[in-house]
Image (cartoon, coloured by chain):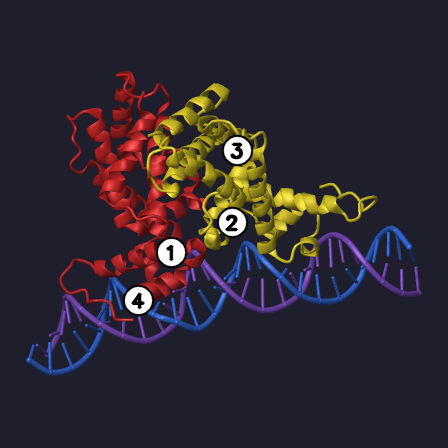
Chain colours: A red, B yellow, C blue, D purple
Amino acid sequence: MEKAEKCDKPDKCAEKREAIIQAALELVAEQGFHGAPMAMIAEKAGVGAGTIYRYFENKDDLIRWIYKNVEERFVEVMMQGYPEQGPVRERLVHIGTALVRHLISEPLQLRFVEQFHNSPYGVDHRREKLFGETRKDIISDLFQEAVTQQIFKPLELAILFSLFFGPLVDICRDHILGFIKLDDALIEQVVGACWDALRR
Amino acid sequence: MEKAEKCDKPDKCAEKREAIIQAALELVAEQGFHGAPMAMIAEKAGVGAGTIYRYFENKDDLIRWIYKNVEERFVEVMMQGYPEQGPVRERLVHIGTALVRHLISEPLQLRFVEQFHNSPYGVDHRREKLFGETRKDIISDLFQEAVTQQIFKPLELAILFSLFFGPLVDICRDHILGFIKLDDALIEQVVGACWDALRR
DNA sequence: TATAAAGGAATGAACGGTCATTCCGCACAA
DNA sequence: TTGTGCGGAATGACCGTTCATTCCTTTATA
């Protein structure tokens, strides 16, 4: 393993912190929490076991920090280029395709989030539906508006979310595991199918 | 904790075995694998820690045995009263409603299966889509037939499965967690929405 | 500039706790 | 008495975390 870069210019040795994060993300995503003991994370990051505790209070802190950042990245991606003034269908298709494209381009992030949700860490996150508040606010607005305008079936938000995001996340997992091969055309077909499920 | 019944009449002390299974199922479902050490399973079952090893080779064996049985139960439930000669829509609705009704009446089974899938145990199960071969065979036939008859969108089976089963499992989880309250009418509406997603 | 002292950062062996599994003595049926 | 099933303390492996020590950079001094 190479020595980490020196702390030459940047205020702090942010590279080391980044290496720890990346190592933890990869190990948890690929092996689950059981396969990601601190010693292994340290080795993969090329640092001593104790060093991690200079950057993170404990393992929980490390894991939650990564989760939070991955989550924020999801929101960012979905909101980038969001056609705020467009028709409902266009906005929904934007969100769906942006999410799917991101998830399959960053399979580690999807796997990490899934591991997180089904672990002791995710227990207290149960009360937050899907991917956090920011997203929930903007997307809830979209769904709510569509229900009010009688574009969507008159169902609760939680159910509409399941109908839309459930299959999308599923197909990303299938793509990552090699069961199917998604391309832009196929993504649009599936997003279209989810639209059909929501539509009145 | 009460002493377990004696081995009076039945060939073997099947009650003890059953108690162990039930205890493990509940603990894993409610607390995850981290919250289900062998000692705790033993205590909850009212047996000694070592006794478990008289009935199961090791923890893996116990967990996999439970998983296999729960899985078989799912297939059983979906196939009970399956209208083999009915139209596609009727058969699909039967499967969907039977599955949802079972999952919400046996929340521990759903939680257990989800814990299993996201754990080291589930790693080698990845290659089996959804709930095992029996179901896959019969249900694959149904979906395949619907595609051939141009009732469904021309998509791969894996994607059609995600569109149909993904939201159904999601809403069951939401129901169990108390986010929504499913009743027969609502179940039928959601199954109907999933049908719309599949439909050409 | 050369040298030395200081202090923050990094290390990894060691610790305490937990877990799956084993094993030996006990109680009861035959 | 003999044998079988059982219990639960004992065992050893593993993991998160700590801390005494080392390393390295910076600063002070001449």
Q: Quadrant of the N terminus of chain B?
A: top right
The local crowd at label 1, few if under 14, some if 14 to 19, many if 20 or more residues have their Cα within 10 Å, is: some
**Residue found farthest to the front:** B149
Marks 3 and 4 sit apart, C-alpha to C-alpha, by 46 Å
Q: Are marks 3 and 4 in contact (CB under 8 Å)?
A: no
Residue A58 percent location from the top left of the image: 38, 53
Q: Are marks 4 and 1 in contact (CB under 8 Å)?
A: no
Q: Which mark is residue A46?
A: 4
Q: Which mark is residue B188?
A: none
Q: Nearer the viewer, residue B192 or D29?
A: B192
Q: Are marks 2 and 3 in contact (CB under 8 Å)?
A: no
The answer to which image quadrant residue B50 occupies is bottom right
Residue A64 shows in the view: no
Marks 4 and 1 sit apart, C-alpha to C-alpha, by 18 Å
Marks 4 and 2 sit apart, C-alpha to C-alpha, by 28 Å
Local SS, label 3: helix
Marks 2 and 1 sit apart, C-alpha to C-alpha, by 19 Å
Residue A11 shows in the view: yes
Residue shown at 24% from the left, 29% from the top: A138
Above or below, C2 against A122 in this view is below
Q: Which residue is mark 2?
A: B34
Residue shown at 26% from the left, 24% from the top: A141
Residue A119 percent location from the top left of the image: 44, 46
- Of labels 4 and 1, earlier in sequence is 1
- Residue type (three-letter) at the residue carrying disc 3: Leu
The local crowd at label 4, few if under 14, some if 14 to 19, many if 20 or more residues have their Cα within 10 Å, is: some
